[in-house]
Amino acid sequence: MLTRNRLLAGAAALVALSLAGPAAAQAPIKIGELNSYKVFPAFLEPYKKGIELAVEEVNAAGGVLGRKIEVVSRDDNGNPGDAVRVAEELLSREGASFLIGTFPSNVGLAVADFAKQRKVLFIAAEPLTDKIVWDQGNAYTFRLRTSTYMQTAMLIPDAVKLKKKRWAIVYPNYEYGQSATAAFKKLLKEKQPDVEFVAEQATPLGKIDAGAVAQALADAKPDAIFSSLFGPDLAKFVREGQTRGLFKGVEVFNLLAGEPEYLDPLKEESPDGWYVTGYPWSELKTPEHTKFLNAYQAKFKDYPRLGSVVGYATVMSAVEGIKKAGSLDQDKLVAAMSGLKLITPFGMIEYRPIDHQSTMGAYVGQIGVKDGKGYMKNWRFVDGKDALPSDADVQKMRPKN
Amino acid sequence: MTLASIIIQLLNGLAAAASLFLVSAGLSLIFGVTRIVNFAHGSLYMLGLYGAYSLIQFFGRTPLGFWGAVVLAALAVGLVGILIEVLVLRRIYRAPELFQLLATFAVVLVIKDIALFTWGAEDLVGPRAPGLSMAVEIMGRRIPAYDLVLIAIGPVVLGALWLLLTRTRWGALVRAATQDREMVGALGVDQARLFTSVFFVGSVLAGLGGALQIPREPANLELDLAIIADAFVITVVGGLGSIGGAFLAAIVIGVAKAFCVGIGSVTWFGFEVSFSKLTLVVEFLIMALVLVVRPYGLLGKPQAAQRAAEPAPRLQVPSWTFALVWLALLALVPLAADRYTTILLTDIVCFALFAVSLHFIMGPAGMVSFGHAAYFGIGAYAAGLLLKRFGLPMEAALLLAPLIAGLFAIVYGWFCVRLSGVYLAMLTLAFAQISWSVVFQWDSMTGGSNGVFGVWPSAWLSDKTAYYYLALVLCGAGILFLWRVLFSPFGYALRAGRDSPLRAEAIGIDLRGFQWAAFALVGALAGLAGAVYAFSKGSISPSSISIAQSTDGLIMVLLGGVETLTGPVVGAAIFTWLRDVVARNTEFWRAVMGGVILLIVLLFPQGLVGGLKALVVRWREQRA
């Protein structure tokens, strides 16, 4: 029977439970993750798997600060306005401790600005834009991925070595393509002052008029081409260029084209000899990558894409950050992230205190074709810290505070 | 450009025009007969590509396998078109004008997720056409043989369609229905069957346009929206219902794009002009030019007056008590709910004003706008730029922004009020896209594709609850003002113009002047919504002017019901809330969203509020 005493006892027990530390500490640490899943599914489906793998591994090892972790994911629809709203939802309703994720530059920058306003840690996973750590950098934002500038800089030594004079450029007409082009022109001009840029094509993202572009570039009679196309635009450009003989006797450099997400669809038409940045997953023999590869293949029966590595390394960064901070206090987290070192499938990285950019590297090499599939040959790993501008330059670009 | 490159770029343009023509011809047919603005037409094109890809895998890469796959894929897409017509659209032909747009929008969402589920996220690069994979040398330059085949296919299909339309009974019926479909119905033609067959033919054309692109375009999930805008532009530039016009327009636009690329960058008087960047917007520039000069497209004729089945019902004045009770309830929410509810409500309040301003112009004023986001986005940008670039205080920026949006509406509106119907709607879209592309390109001022950051409100409004109250007061006042205006002589004059332009002018109403004023008014208020939205987000990006934003507005108005005053508010609330709830599950949320909208469409063909009102009326009648 329900007596007043029992009721009181029950209430007291409830109060005691809710006050007791250990009970509450058992709840998992929530990390808020947002991304444009439906807009860039080719990259983000493998990315999501990378996240799942990391969460599983972390929790199997007992979690962090004695608690399990949970990544709560949201779709931001590729729209900065929606992104800021779901970011707020993750923080205030889901009780996420901080934020990770995002793909397009404009969404990444909007969430970074939100993180600054809200004084919350944000680890940008994929946005490549240089501005997120430099011109628009802020104290609360860190970025994992090798940036546009870094990847472009990694290709420069090969470009200089070839001593080509006439360069044509093609790029998707938005932040990423624009800054890749600007960085390439600036860096190449420094090393090779007599270089000439004979044609420049800015194509609408996802809507390249590939035949016309290939023809216009061929008309300029370039010795070499620098492209930052990816996805369907890249596939169309490759096919039209090959049919029209654009690439005959012309060296081509293409950012990102070695990433399995964009290389694999090209199959037997993968352009032999192009200089690219990418991810030769099947040929990496480092222990940290082998461990990741085996775990990934065992769990998903599929090979990892670059997105998988980014998703995995983002969660690992977050977890190591929490571990180093020893608490979920934002100021401590931010302090811990600054200078944080951890092992990723691409080896050791550090989140640089000077601009919060990680030193995650990338693989640079040439595309080859084998058994009707593209792969990366003559590749080498370039550590991110060797592809960044001088500290003085960085300080000039990044706002103080 | 040398002569050789001019000729080659001409050929490139013609090859690109072939598929554009097929897709637009299908759209034009469907629109001509059924008056449905078919958003899902781009999805049918995408299905054509995916279908052809799979069928070629299955048949093998032989010439027979390739062409067999192309034809079969087109026919299969035709069947999908029939399914859409029979299962969804046939049930809502009697709904208010444009309501079908909502249904086809839902179909787009569903098809996209079905394609993702069936074919996966990776881009699928199809094979080259067997036997046509080589290039042909013309004037020392190489052009793919397949492109030459495409150039030939365009006129062949045009000829076939011309024969079909002029030499068969079915064609005669289609032409008759395009001119006057009530009359065709009155003469005893089975409209349901005619519509289904037209849908089939239109969908086959979309599917064929897609399948033929297989050697040129990887099958991917962005194709549907990439092509639909172009297809609408071509249909309208050519003249609605005119197949020959669509052919001409496809060529004009295909060739113009190729030449923008071919010319590249040129230096004029020391300024570098990049024509290649113009490819972002060139089709909309052409459309704006054509519509200003020829209000019915290149080969179109004035639309026959549509006899509305039933006149739009009278608008009911919402009572003051009704409005005050709701305002009071909304004002109390932050006391009871959590922080996020307040934030979501701030979004809803902004979108409600946006939707009400759109409803004002498309409902009572009778001028449908497909580019209403222009004013929302310009308001947002004006607020952000006044704050960040011109150093104005936030409060001043917030109040000046609507004026700037209104100024733009005055300029754009001057051109738009000279047109009517879908032509008017497409001209508003052209202006929105032109604004978008300027914002997108003008890095030094607008931040280009990234947008403007750090657009936060002043300290006294930085608390989310405080900002919510500000949004509620400003947007609430805007909504009430617009409603009040509808019952002023000005509002009655607008409705008179919608119901009968001739009679309205005969009794001395300066209709164009009134419509122009209405444009400026809703532009300013949409700008207010945009400015309030910008400060609630802290950043603005070009997506606030995008087609997607304009579409969202249309969806909200239609979802709530275009024939009621409160409909757009309810629509904005339901749509925003639904997206928030549904998108939490990141997998296949689009299909769920599409399914829910379809359900609403089928259950409430007058929109939510319209449908509920009808239910209440029926219930009362039964009790009486």
Image (spheres, grey):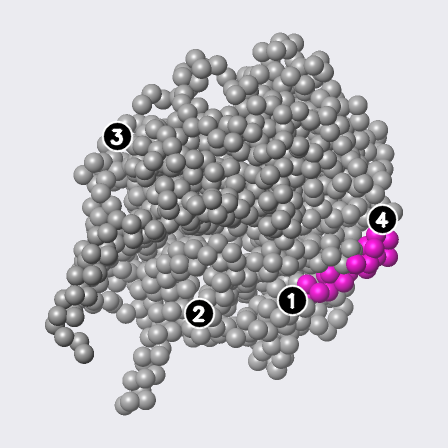
Kindly state the secondary structure of the residue where label 1 is placed: helix
Question: Which of the two marks, 3 or 2, is nearer to us in this view?
Answer: 2
Q: Mark 1, residues whose alpha carbon is within 10 Å: few (<14), some, or many (≥20)?
A: some
What residue is at 43 percent from the left and 45 percent from the top? Answer: A62
Q: Amino acid at mark 4?
A: Pro
Q: Which residue is mark 1?
A: B80
Name the main secondary structure of what is drawn in magenta.
helix
Q: Position of residue A344 (x, y in %)?
A: 53, 33
Kindly state the secondary structure of the residue where label 4 is placed: loop
Q: Which residue is mark 2?
A: B600
- Give the mark nearest the N terminus, 2 or 1: 1
The disc label shown at residue B130, or none:
4
- Residue B244 shows in the view: no
Question: Which of the two marks, 1 or 3, is nearer to us in this view?
Answer: 1
- Residue B47 shows in the view: yes
- Give the mark nearest the N terminus, 4 or 1: 1
Q: Which residue is mark 3?
A: B392
- Quadrant that contains the N terminus of chain B: top right
Pointer 1 chain = B
